[in-house]
Structure formats: structure tokens, C-alpha cells
Amino acid sequence: MPVTNRRVFVKQRPQGMPTLDDFGHAEDTIETVPEQHVLVKVDTLSVDAFIRTTLDEAGLHEMSELGAPVTALGVGEVLESQFDGLAAGDWVCGPLMAQTHALMPGAAFQKIEPSANIPPSTYLGVLGLTTGLTAWAGMVPVGEVASGNVVVVSGAAGAVGTVAAQLGKARGATVIGIAGGPEKCAFLTGDLGLDGAIDYKNDDIAARLQELAPNGVDVFFDNVGGELLDIVLDNLAVNARVVICGAISQYQHLHDVRGPKLYLRLAERNASMRGFTVDHHAAAFAEAQAELSRLFTEGAVKLPEHVVEGVDNFPDALLTLFNGGHTGKMLVKP
Ligand SMILES: NC(=O)c1ccc[n+]([C@@H]2O[C@H](COP(=O)([O-])OP(=O)(O)OC[C@H]3O[C@@H](n4cnc5c(N)ncnc54)[C@H](OP(=O)(O)O)[C@@H]3O)[C@@H](O)[C@H]2O)c1
């Protein structure tokens, strides 16, 4: 004490795709830790698609105030604690925000126990709320994936998609990933061992889907929405489950979302379409983390990390997430 905190804040509300001008940088000094609070040195920040919606006035998630640090989950080490449940040296996970140090009520955090096998960043990736737990909730209780199913995952080379696709494989499904570009498709079939990949930027998606899934799709885990959702709706198997995890193609214009035209395929194929928010599956998190930890340590679920250095570069990392310039989990080391 005292420590200097450098943070990235919301300067103005983005119009469409955010630009670097929408963000500012500031420094302040933290002098004392009030009762019930902890001071945390941020180790790693998670760059998530939902952050885009917090920048709008009326987004899907809670809005960030202008001047407030950009919303971000992270992991870090407690430097000083005035909160009974945490002590200096403990590791925590929670809403640390885009900054180097966080002074917050201790109750905001969950204590984690990183180890040689499970490094701190895993609590943002394979075991993280917005990545591994989201993939598990969408694939297991919502998608009810079963052995022998044909599963399609969009945004498959991103964080949630990578884990969701491998969970499908681990449960005995045939898994087809959709991603942008030949390199990402090679990652899906090579590194992840998926059964097929569709390059939505270069392939005829409908033709490739019919080729790879001639008997239709049993589970569609959708991260993208828009036109892609319609193409897969047109190729559903009887009793299919369409899982609406997200719709990253729509987040720049939430006031004008393009909904599915072909929703009547659900009735024709006796199929269902169900959205979910990971928080609503908290009762199953212990079960999910047990399965994900096992698969991670066995090497059956892997998640490459794309690490950007420096808190000032948090906005660049967020823009890269939307441009698809990463594979796996996007992280910032502040
Ligand atoms: N339901 C929940 O509780 C919950 C929780 C967390 C996350 N999510 C959702 O999960 C999804 C994935 O999030 P993430 O944080 O893991 O991000 P991510 O998948 O690591 O990154 C986003 C990826 O989306 C792809 N993309 C971007 N714009 C696209 C477009 N217009 N059309 C097609 N693909 C596009 C890009 O890959 P390409 O190079 O392949 O284009 C990019 O790499 C998001 O929809 C997010 O909202 C939902």
C-alpha cells in the first residue's frame, strides 16, 4: 500500500462495431482497504462476447456506466483483505473488471485453488463460468447430447464452441464445427479431432451440411445466430434440439436482430429450440466442474489460449474477439 491501479473505462457508447475511441485509460491510487473489502492484483482477464452488450444503454446484460471500468471476469491474487473469508495470498475468481488491481467487497469473489495441473487461467477457460460451464450447460442439460447424435457447433473455434464441441465428442457424438477460414477448420478437425468442419466464410454452408450430415442434425449448439441459424434449421433431424447459446452475429445491432425465418422446421421435425443463460444452471456447476476437470486433466478437452499483454490493450482484444482473430480462449494479462 498504496498501489497504483490502471484501468480501461467506457468513454462513449459504441455505434455498431466498437472502435478504440469508445474506450479511455486512467490511473488512480488505492490507499486503504475498507471493512469487508479485498484488494486483488489481477492476474488474467477473460475477454467475452457478452462484454459488447454491457457497452450499450439497453443491452442484454447490465449496462456499464460511462467512466466505469469495462466489465470483465478475471482471476487474481489477494494482496490485502478486510473480509473474513479471504486472506492475503488467496486466489480468487470474479468480476475484477478491466484493470490491474481491484478493490471490491470480498463477497463478490469465489476462492479458487489453482495447481500445477490446473493453472489460474483455467478458471476462466475450461472451468470458467462464461466458457466451460456455459458449454456444459448448453450441451448437457439443454442440448441433451447423447452417443450417436450428430451435433453441429457454430463459433466452434472460439472459447465456448471449442469446449462444447469436445464435450460432444467425449459423449460419443459425431461433431461438425462451423468456423471462419481454412486455418480454424484445420484446427477443428486436426487439433480437436472433430468429424467435420465447415468454413462459413468460403464454403457453401448448406451444401457442406448436407454432405456431412445427410440424415440431419440432432443437436445444434448455436453461438452465432442470423443466417447460419436458418441454414441449420433447414437441416434438422426429427426430435432435434436447437440450443441458443448466443448470437454473436447480432450483437452490434441488438435493436434490429435478425430472427429465424425457418422456425416452422421445428414443428415439421418435432424439434425444440431453447435458449439458456449459464447462471440458471448453477445447481449443476459442481457436477459440470467435476466432468470438465477430469476431461481437461485427461487431455480430452483442451482450449488454446490467445493472450494479449497489457491492460491498455483490453479494447484491442475485445475487437479481435469480434473479428475472429483468435482461436480458443481470448485472455488479457494486465
Ligand atoms: N448463454 C450463456 O450463458 C452464454 C455465456 C457465455 C457466452 N455465451 C455466448 O457464447 C458465444 C461465444 O462466446 P465466446 O466468449 O466464447 O467468444 P469466442 O467464441 O471465443 O469468440 C467469438 C467468435 O465468434 C465468431 N464470430 C464473430 N462474429 C461472427 C459472425 N458475424 N458470424 C459468425 N461468427 C462470428 C468469431 O470466429 P470466426 O473466426 O469463426 O468468425 C469469433 O472468434 C457468444 O455468442 C456468447 O454470447 C453465452
Image (tube, rainbow, N blue to C red):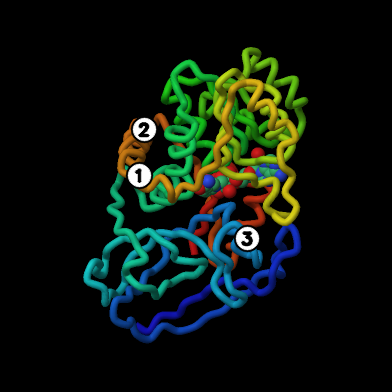
Residue that extends furthest to the front in the rendered view of this protein: 267
Instruction: Examine the image and state in which quarter residue 74 appears.
Output: bottom left
Left or right: residue 15 versus residue 110 is right
Which residue occupies the foreground of this view, 256 or 178? Answer: 256
Which residue occupies the foreground of this view, 142 or 324? Answer: 142
Residue 325: % across, % down: 65, 47
Residue 331: % across, % down: 51, 54
Can the viewer see residue 72?
A: yes
Few, some or many C-alpha atoms within 10 Å of disc 1 (few <14, some 14-19, many ≥20)? some
- First in residue order: circle 3 vs circle 1: 3
Few, some or many C-alpha atoms within 10 Å of disc 3 (few <14, some 14-19, many ≥20)? some
- Mark 2 or mark 3: which is in front? 3
- First in residue order: circle 2 vs circle 3: 3
Can the viewer see residue 324?
A: no
> In the figure, 66 relative to 165: above or below?
below
Which residue was labeled with disc 3? 59
